[in-house]
């Protein structure tokens, strides 16, 4: 049921919009004139937005990759797992 | 004219002119003399062989911009002023000069000297010019900066906000540099699950410009390859940062479809890449801090949002309860015995029962409120997410339990109150012979004869059944 709610969120929803809408909803719910049914609908939307945001965070998989070459529509990568060589700083000074 | 020409020749040319003169005596000048064209052709041949593409350092002198042809003619002279050389720059070469020439500017010019046959004048044909010395480098930098600024590449209005949560962070820097190491270290601490794609690029040397531009364009070209870019290089000398002041790199940064954070050199070094970027970080580590919020802050923000939602909704439910309580004191009930007031029902359902004894309402408020209670509990359970620690979860369940306990208590009170109401039910009052009279179109009982007039329709509720009636006359009590 809650899954249905998340799916009912607009397809174009971004993380930024979801978070800002969530904050709007909290303020709207504080409006004493807001009807009970309307409040419940808002509450449900707020929870769905919060779940959406958490979902977006979860989707990010820890990966560190290095580009090997390009194809017309993609970057071909491999995991960057080589030891970063502290001695070969490529002429750069370390940060102070 | 001729003597002056010879003089010029002696000044300019070397050994082989002397050989020519030596040969004069052998067969006589009439037989061996060269034409002027031949001499100049020979001189030019020697110059091409002996001084091909020589670099000359000198001050720009007599600079008047380009001629109508687009070519440019001026002189280079030693700083002491003791020597001067005419130079020419053809239009095609002039356009490639990365800065604007100015009178008095010290430059390094590469070209080949030759003599222009028609005038017999020696000049250096220049194919490349660089500013020489720190002052000139600075000037070239300022000129490029002014030109790109005029084009709007650094406009603040064009700066884009960074995404709050980048799905992938693109990094353009050297694979073996300090910058990459610093960025990965900071990201690992802030957002351990970050997805980073490094497009390796030399950050100094001849290939740097090409490689940085290639990487920037790749991230722009391939959709979803990154949500934000970091272009970085650790500290270095001014010359080491040259690629980040290169026009092609600056333009690629400005044209990037993905927002760019620049982190080049140390805080004091501001490159044109920094100016063109959407955001400038002082160092690569700071760039990593700017591209993504700490993961725990995200968690905190969402948890706070959810908590505020629950608090607000609970407040709303409390107000609904109070509203229902107020219903019991509506004027509609004013005409009934004072005991009704005694039955002041905290429970909204009691008010509903009272109301429904007058007219049916589709769903009783009591049932709706009870239904809400269940739904709220269900939501709170659903909203409990694995992210949250057990303590938060327990706190949330406890809050839900408290709320449902309150609702259960309210419902129990409702039962008691309803029983008391039953005894006081208006229907029982009616059974004793009273009737409730309402004016047509009104639901509140009629309590004052002054409020109706002859001809008004009335409804009369008896213990059993209803009567429709019409007012014949009224008598108003005068107190």
Image: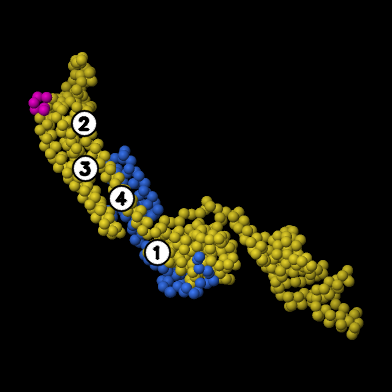
Chain colours: A blue, B yellow
Q: Measure the C-alpha gap from mark 2 to mark 3.
A: 19 Å
Q: Position of residue B421 (x, y in %)?
A: 13, 34
**Do badges 1 and 2 share one subunit?**
yes
Residue under label 1, please give it.
B189
Residue B311 image position (x, y, % from top left): 29, 46
Residue B329 is labelled as 2
Q: CA distance from mark 1 to mark 2?
A: 61 Å
Q: Is residue B168 left or right of residue B43?
A: left
The answer as to whether the residues below labels 2 and 4 share one chain is yes
**Location of mark 4 (residue):** B307
Q: Chain of mark 4?
A: B
> For the residues tagged 4 and 1, is the chain the same?
yes
Please give left or right for residue B304 compared with residue B461 in the image: right
Residue B197 is left or right of residue B146, and the answer is left
Callouts 4 and 1 close, C-beta under 8 Å? no
Q: Which residue is mark 3?
A: B369
The local secondary structure at tag 3 comes to helix
Q: Are marks 1 and 2 in contact (CB under 8 Å)?
A: no
Q: Residue furthest left?
A: B432
What whole-number distance in Å separates the C-alpha atoms at marks 4 and 3?
22 Å
* Chain label for disc 3: B
Between the residue at mark 3 and the residue at mark 1, the CA separation in whole angstroms equals 47 Å
Look at 50% across and 57% down and name the residue there. Answer: B279
Q: Mark 1: few, some, or many residues within 10 Å (few <14, many ≥20)? A: few
Q: Residues within 10 Å of mark 4 (few under 14, many from 20)?
A: some
Q: Residue B59, percent across and down?
A: 73, 64
């Amino acid at each position: 049921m809650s899954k249905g709610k998340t799916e009912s969120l607009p397809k174009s929803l971004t993380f930024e919009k979801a978070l800002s809408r969530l904050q709007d909803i909290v303020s709207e719910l504080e409006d004493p004139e807001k009807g009970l049914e309307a409040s419940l609908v808002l509450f449900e939307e707020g929870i769905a937005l919060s779940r959406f945001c958490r979902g977006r965070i979860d989707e990010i998989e820890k990966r560190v990759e290095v580009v090997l070459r390009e194809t017309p529509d993609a970057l071909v990568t491999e995991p960057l797992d080589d030891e970063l060589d502290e001695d070969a700083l490529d002429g750069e000074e370390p940060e102070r | 004219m001729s003597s002056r020409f010879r003089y010029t020749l002696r000044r300019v040319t070397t050994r082989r002119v002397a050989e020519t003169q030596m040969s004069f005596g052998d067969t006589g000048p009439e037989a061996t003399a060269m034409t002027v064209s031949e001499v100049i052709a020979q001189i030019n041949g020697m110059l091409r062989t002996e001084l091909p593409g020589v670099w000359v350092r000198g001050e720009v002198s007599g600079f008047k911009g380009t001629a109508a042809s687009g070519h440019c003619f001026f002189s280079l002279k030693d700083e002491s002023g003791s020597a001067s050389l005419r130079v020419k720059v053809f239009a095609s070469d002039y356009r490639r000069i990365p800065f604007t020439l100015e009178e008095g500017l010290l430059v390094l010019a590469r070209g080949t000297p030759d003599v222009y046959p028609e005038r017999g004048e020696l000049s250096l044909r220049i194919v490349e010019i660089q500013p020489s010395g720190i002052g000139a480098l600075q000037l070239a930098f300022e000129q490029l900066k002014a030109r790109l600024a005029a084009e709007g590449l650094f406009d603040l209005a064009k700066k884009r906000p960074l995404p709050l949560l980048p799905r992938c962070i693109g990094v353009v820097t050297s694979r073996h540099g300090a910058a990459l190491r610093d960025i990965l270290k900071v990201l690992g601490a802030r957002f351990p699950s970050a997805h980073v794609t490094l497009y390796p690029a030399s950050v100094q040397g001849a290939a740097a410009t090409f490689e940085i531009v290639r990487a920037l364009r790749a991230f722009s070209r391939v959709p979803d390859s990154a949500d934000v870019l970091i272009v970085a290089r650790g500290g270095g000398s001014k010359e080491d940062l040259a690629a980040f002041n290169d026009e092609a790199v600056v333009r690629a940064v400005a044209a990037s479809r993905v927002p760019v954070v620049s982190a080049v050199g140390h805080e004091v070094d501001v490159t044109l890449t920094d100016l063109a970027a959407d955001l400038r970080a002082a160092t690569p580590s700071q760039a990593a801090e700017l591209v993504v919020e700490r993961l725990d802050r995200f968690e905190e923000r969402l948890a706070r949002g959810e908590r505020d939602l629950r608090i607000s909704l609970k407040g709303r439910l409390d107000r609904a309860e109070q509203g229902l309580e107020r219903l019991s004191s509506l004027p509609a009930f004013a005409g009934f015995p004072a005991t009704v007031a005694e039955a002041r029902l905290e429970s909204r359902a009691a008010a509903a029962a009272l109301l429904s004894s007058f007219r049916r309402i589709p769903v009783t408020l009591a049932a709706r409120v009870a239904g809400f209670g269940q739904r709220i509990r269900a939501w709170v359970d659903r909203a409990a997410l694995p992210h949250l620690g057990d303590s938060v979860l327990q706190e949330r369940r406890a809050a839900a339990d408290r709320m449902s306990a309150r609702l259960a208590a309210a419902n129990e009170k409702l039962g008691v109150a309803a029983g008391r109401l039953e005894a006081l039910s208006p229907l029982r009052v009616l059974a004793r012979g009273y009737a409730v009279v309402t004016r047509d179109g009104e639901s509140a009982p009629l309590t004052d004869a002054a409020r109706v007039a002859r001809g008004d329709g009335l409804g009369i509720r008896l213990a059993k059944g209803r009567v429709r009636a019409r007012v014949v006359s009224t008598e108003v009590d005068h107190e």
